[in-house]
Structure formats: C-alpha cells, structure tokens
Image: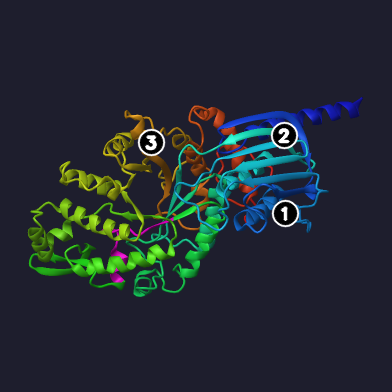
Amino acid sequence: MLNSLAALLLFLLLLLSGLQAAEGVWPLPQRVSSSAEPVPLNPQDFSFDYARHSAAQQGCSVLDSAFNRYFALIFPEYTSANAALSSSEATTFRLEVSVTRDDCESYPAADSSEGYRLSVSEGKASLNAETVWGALRGLETFSQLVYEDEFGKFFLNKTEIEDFPRFQYRGMLLDTSRHYLPVQALLKTLDAMAYSKLNVFHWHIVDDPSFPYQCSTFPDLSNKGAFHPMTHIYTQLDVSRVISHARLRGIRVLPEFDSPGHTRSWGRGRSDLLTPCYSGAIPSGTFGPVNPASPSTFHFMARLYKEVSSVFPDSYIHLGGDEVDFTCWKSNPDVRAFMKKMGFGRDFTKLESFYMESIVNITAALNKTPIVWQDVFDYHERVSTPQQMMPVDSLSVVEVWKEGCYLCEVRRVTKAGLRVILASPWYLDQPGPTHDWARYYTVRPLDFKGTEEQKKLVIGGEVCMWGEYVDATNLSPRLWPRASAAAERLWSDEKLTSSVERAAPRLQEFRCKLLRRGIQAEPLYIGHCRHEYQGV
C-alpha cells in the first residue's frame, strides 16, 4: 500500500514538473501545446541527428558544434564517451534536425530567419527550420524542455512548438573602454545571450578612457591609447575569436567606433586627429572632438573604417555620433573659418551633421549600413528643411537612447521613415535591486501613436551595459537575469507575456538554469536553486 502511494506521489510530482517544464521555456515561444505525461530520457540512449532531407548534414560547423554543446548542457553530469551526434539506429531517443538552406559556413545577418518548429513525441523529436540560426533557437528551447527529478532521472513531455522572434534585432551593448573586459568574459556573455535568444552583440569597443582595439593600420591607437598596450587590448586574433564564438551561437557582432565625440583616447595615438582648444587666441593645450575642419581627418577615417569593415563581417556598423561638446570647436579659429567657408554661420549642429554625413558616406562606400545614436537624427532634423533632408537610407537606422518620453522619440524617428532600435528603457548599468526586472519586462516598444508602416520600422531593441561601474567582477550579476526580461519582450508575443506575476516564476526557474550553466545571475528574491552557483 505504501509502495503504491509513493509511486502515485512520484507520478504526480513528475506530472507537475513536466507541466512546469513545458511552460518554463524562456523566452516564451509563440505557440506551445504540451502533454502532462512525462517521457523518460536516457543520456546513454539519446542523440542528435540530421534528418535525411535536411540541406545541412554532418560536417555543418554551426550544428555539429551546437549538438556537442547542447548535449553537455542537457546532461551536465554525463561524462561517457558516447557522442552527442550519432547515426546509430539503436539510439532510443533521437532529435532529428532539418534545415531547408545550407548556410552552415555563413554568418547570421540582419534578415536571417530564426523561426523553427519543434515536435516532441515518444522516443523521438523533430526540429525543422529554414536556417541553421532557427535551428539553434530550437535547440535552446529543446534544452529547456528537459527536466530532472530528485533521483537524477531526465524527462521530457510530448510538446508541439511553433516559434519565431517578434523583433529581428535583439541586442546587447557592452562597453569595453571604461573598463577592459577580458575575452573570456565576452565569450561567457555570448553564451548567456544565446540562452536568452539575444542575437546582436553591440561591441562599444573604444571610447574616451581607452582604445583597446589593436588596429593594424594605425598601431599607435592602442599602443598609446589603451590602458596597457599588451595586457588591455583586443588583438586581431581576440576579435576573430569573439566573432567565431558568436557565429556558432547565431549572434551578430556589431562594432561601434563612436565619433566625433568620445574620442579622447584616439588622440593619444593620432596627434592631428582631435581639435586643439583655444583660450582666447592661444591654444590651451587641451583637445576636443575630432577635427572636422581638417582634410586629414577624413583620410584617416576612411582607412580606419576600411580595416574595421574587413575585420567585422556584419553588414551593419555603428558610427556613434552622440554627446558632442561644441565648446572646443567654438574656441578654435580654424574651425570657425571652415564653418564660414561652408556657410554654416555659427550653428555648430550643422558642423556635426556635416561630419556625420561624411562618415556615413565613407562607410556606405564600404557596403556597410550605418547605425547612429539619436543625437545625429536630432541635429539633422534641426538643420534641414524637407527639401534638404539627407536621403532616408543614408541615416538608415537610429538608436533611441535618451531619457524621457522614448516612445515620443520612436514616433518622431519612424515618422521620418527611418528604422529604430530602442535602447532608452533598457540601460542596465546603474545599480539597483534585481526585482526591478519588472520595469524592463513591461516596456512596450510599439505602444505609440503611429501607422502600421511606422511600427514596422521598429526593428528591435537592446540592453546596454555601460562600463563606468562595471568590469569582469560584476558584469554577469548586473546583466542577468534582468537582460533576460528584455529578451522575452523582444522575442515573445506581447499579449502572452503581459503579466509580471505569471512571468516571475518562469524567470526564477530560468535564473536557476543560468546558474547551472555557469552564469552568475543574481537572485530575483528569497528562495534557492537546486543547483546553486559554485563559483566556476
């Protein structure tokens, strides 16, 4: 009698945990149907495999790597030599993966499909996607569907999922100038991004404090501009390693070389680049933004961006353009003379617009699509009449970051026919309690008055981790799981994820998954995870 009761209780526990597993995928898929009946899963009899009709087969770098990676994530304590990828017909549970396009050796792009269909039944599962990038998202979902009982046994539920992202651009900005972040910290962050289905690493690689990018064309930029020319730089090999790691996780690497402001570190290795500031008629010995009055400036920028474009394969590049202080420009007699020659009068916003248009043209000639901070749009809008307006596809993409009514800004930019990336409500660098994840979760990117065509111009958003108070010691806890709250907002159906109360237990469970995978994610509230973080 007792044995029968114990068996019944165990079965009920498995049913409950199975339901939680099916509903516990983060971010929430678009459509899910799941049975409560648990299906046993044995690591020794489990394998990934390519479907016979798949365009990609064994040897596909993206999927072969993912199969090995996800086998270890699903069965972290399983150390047998049994391969994750197997064609053995004796395997009792197989996940067959099929893609319709063989893009195994390419890079994820702005228009890459990430949709997938996942079907789990007794003894087998199938994952179908148009691209390997969609297959990666489906593998992440499958890994989260697997759960473990108190005795170390693994289970899965019969499940049907159809999923795709709500927004194409789901990014994360890391600032590696104010504090240098070791390559290993970047790779760990890319791993966690993949777990949350974020797909763009916006690498704010240089800024005022330091220039850690080791430039082959201009070596002195890092030799003199980095915190240390040997230990606090990103070599070409480092950058290649980051890009490769990201590619295998379906993540684009988008570099930002912000100018004309935020360039103090550039001047240490390039003495003629910045604007000399004046005190009256005498140089003060200090320097301001990049000097737009000097022809050598644009020769330098053309050569720099030519290298950057060859190193970073993504078709997009971030040109910055924010927070330009005009004080030094105003003091410099050569700049004032240049403005008079150009007919700018005393309007330094016109000078800023002239500089940014020149940089946009340089990168456009390199077949790169520019992204700029919203300041560039603000200045451009202020100085232009509709007849003089720079062509819409020149500015292309505007990142909205300023505080205040960010939806008003989104509406204003989309009304001009430009695409938008929303960052304003997702600045995570400021300290705060982890339960403030709800304010990131309740952001509504399309909740502005505008036409459907305008709303289609909002291509996504990104969380931003600026580096004033963040280095490798506190990067992960400050990012996670708060960044995951924004990730679900950018991936999932807004109507299905409108409740903070319903999301909280799922995010708590996802935080526990992050801990088990070695990500130092902060706690949401009182409680515990079965597998606490062990500090490795």
Left or right, 157 with respect to 301, comes to right
The mark that comes first in sequence, 3 or 1, is: 1
Occupied quadrant, residue 27:
top right
Disc 1 versus disc 2: distance between alpha carbons?
22 Å
Q: Nearer the viewer, mark 1 or mark 2?
A: 1
The residue where tag 1 is placed is: 85
Residue drawn at x 29%, y 65% as measured from the top left: 301
The C terminus sits in image quarter: bottom right
Which residue type carries mark 1? Leu
Residue drawn at x 71%, y 44% as measured from the top left: 95
The residue where tag 2 is placed is: 157
Indicate whether residue 265 is drawn in magenta.
yes
The mark that comes first in sequence, 3 or 2, is: 2
The N terminus sits in image quarter: top right
Occupied quadrant, residue 309:
bottom left
Left or right, 347 with respect to 230, comes to left
Q: Could you say where residue 302 lies in the image, as x and y percent from the top left?
A: 29, 66
Res. 456 mark: 3
Disc 3 versus disc 2: distance between alpha carbons?
36 Å
The mark that comes first in sequence, 1 or 2, is: 1
Give the structural element (helix, strand or loop) at label 1: loop
Give the structural element (helix, strand or loop) at label 2: strand
Most extreme residue toward the front is: 53
Q: Could you say where residue 479 lies in the image, as x and y percent from the top left?
A: 49, 48
Question: Which of the two residues, 205 or 386, is positioned nearer the viewer here?
Answer: 386
Q: Could you say where residue 335 lies in the image, as x and y percent from the top left?
A: 13, 63
Q: Can you see residue 27? A: yes
Does residue 486 sit above or below 219 in this rendering?
A: above
